[in-house]
């Protein structure tokens, strides 16, 4: 296959590049590129950021939250994870390969990894998951992109995706660790991911030529990264309805907040608990309806919220801690 080189580790640029190629770089044969992201959680197009990801852990550890243009579930990337993208015309006679990561599986097997394409969207090695992928069709072509865990930090992976009610929470972190694997364990002849990437690059290219994007095309990708993929509206604003419950012990007593969200906005919020107050919180609940569910947005409203009246002795920081920590 022909190929692009993508050395960017900016997850917003990389998600923009996937969409740009799908919509604009149309060839009569498949092409591919390999790439990496700095530590990031990538959620599917239709996922709810608030219910799928441990947002507090991401904030505390400087991990990016990014939304992609394909479906599927949330995945964790770091610099020891290698990603691949394959773009194929729908009409190509080898479409059966273009619509799955079969070329990736075949390349791994050439490197000595007993990889198998298993289930709905996974690559397994000896019963353990090493890769997931997703697909999208547009402009008479399709994109397949996915992960290849080489030496990913499994502890971080489990923490970022561990939320109440999540699959990880239900099955337990120990169980998750037993069901995923790093390819490093199956590639003892390679000293680094750089070496593995170079080997996969050669196998997948199989002597075909490199493609290059013009500076004008790259600039379009950068604009998409800045105006779409890195924006609150795309990352959080696409989140569909979700119900959250937050609870904390404040100076006034224990407060529980029941929050309903839609597209990142508070549609309803109510407070209960054994807390002391001067005035009921009904006015506060009304003022918060329609507000973005983010710390900065609520801080901007703080002067009008009268937090100490509704939660006796509490400060705005106490209140933000209840909602976000």
Image: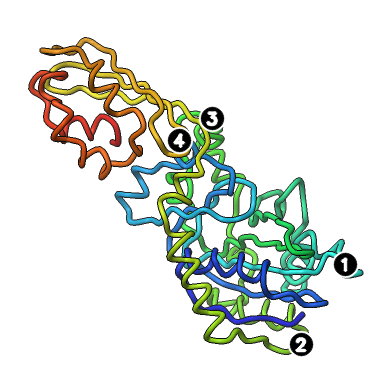
Choose between 250 and 154: the one closer to the eye: 250
> What is the secondary structure assignment of the residue under circle 2?
loop
Separation (CA) of disc 1 from disc 3? 42 Å
User: Are the residues at dot 2 and dot 4 in contact (C-beta closer than 8 Å)?
Assistant: no
User: Are the residues at dot 2 and dot 1 in contact (C-beta closer than 8 Å)?
Assistant: no
* Residue 306 in sight from this viewpoint: yes
What residue would you read off at disc 1? 91
Mark with earlier residue (2, 4): 4
Residue 94, placed above or below residue 181: below
Separation (CA) of disc 4 from disc 1? 41 Å
Separation (CA) of disc 2 from disc 4? 44 Å
User: Are the residues at dot 3 and dot 2 in contact (C-beta closer than 8 Å)?
Assistant: no
Mark with earlier residue (2, 1): 1
What residue would you read off at disc 4? 163
Q: Residues within 10 Å of mark 2 (few under 14, many from 20)?
A: few
Mark with earlier residue (4, 1): 1
What residue would you read off at disc 3? 170
Can you give x and y, in whole percent of width and height, for residue 46 in the image? 59, 43
Q: Is residue 233 left or right of residue 94?
A: left
Residue at 62% across / 76% down in the picture?
A: 189
Label 3 vs label 2, nearer the camera = 2
Residue 232, placed above or below residue 167: below
Label 4 vs label 1, nearer the camera = 1
Q: Quadrant of the C terminus?
A: top left
Can you give x and y, in whole percent of width and height, for residue 140 in the image? 79, 64
> What is the secondary structure assignment of the residue under circle 1?
loop
Choose between 89 and 39: the one closer to the eye: 89
What residue would you read off at disc 2? 208
Residue at 56% across / 72% down in the picture?
A: 35
Can you give x and y, in whole percent of width and height, for residue 59 in the image? 32, 49
- Within the image, what quadrant is residue 29 found in? bottom right
Separation (CA) of disc 3 from disc 2? 46 Å
């Amino acid at each position: 296959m022909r190929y692009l080189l993508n050395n960017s580790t900016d997850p917003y640029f990389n998600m923009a590049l996937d969409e740009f190629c799908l919509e604009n770089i149309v060839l009569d044969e498949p092409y591919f590129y390999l790439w990496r992201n700095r530590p990031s959680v990538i959620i599917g197009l239709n996922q709810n950021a608030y219910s799928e990801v441990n947002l507090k852990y991401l904030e505390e550890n400087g991990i990016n939250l990014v939304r992609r243009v394909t479906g599927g579930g949330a995945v964790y990337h770091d610099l020891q994870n290698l990603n691949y993208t394959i773009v194929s015309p729908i009409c190509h006679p080898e479409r059966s390969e273009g619509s799955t990561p079969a070329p990736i599986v075949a390349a791994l097997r050439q490197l000595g990894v007993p990889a198998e394409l298993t289930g709905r969207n996974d690559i397994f090695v000896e019963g353990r998951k090493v890769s997931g992928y997703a697909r999208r069709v547009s402009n008479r072509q399709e994109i397949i992109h996915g992960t290849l865990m080489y030496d990913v930090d499994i502890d971080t992976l489990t923490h970022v995706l561990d939320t109440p009610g999540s699959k990880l929470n239900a099955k337990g972190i120990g169980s998750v660790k037993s069901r995923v694997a790093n390819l490093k364990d199956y590639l003892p002849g390679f000293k680094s991911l750089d070496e593995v990437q170079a080997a996969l690059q050669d196998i997948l290219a199989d002597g075909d030529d490199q493609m290059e994007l013009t500076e004008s095309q790259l600039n379009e990708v950068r604009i998409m990264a800045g105006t779409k993929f890195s924006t609150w509206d795309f990352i959080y604003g696409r989140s569909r309805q979700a119900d959250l419950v937050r609870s904390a012990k404040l100076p006034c007593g224990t407060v529980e907040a029941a929050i309903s969200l839609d597209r990142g906005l508070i549609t309803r919020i109510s407070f209960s608990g054994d807390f002391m107050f001067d005035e009921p919180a009904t006015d506060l609940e009304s003022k918060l309806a329609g507000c973005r569910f983010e710390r900065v947005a609520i801080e901007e409203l703080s002067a009008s919220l009268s937090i100490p009246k509704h939660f006796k002795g509490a400060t705005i920081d106490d209140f933000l801690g209840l909602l976000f920590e």
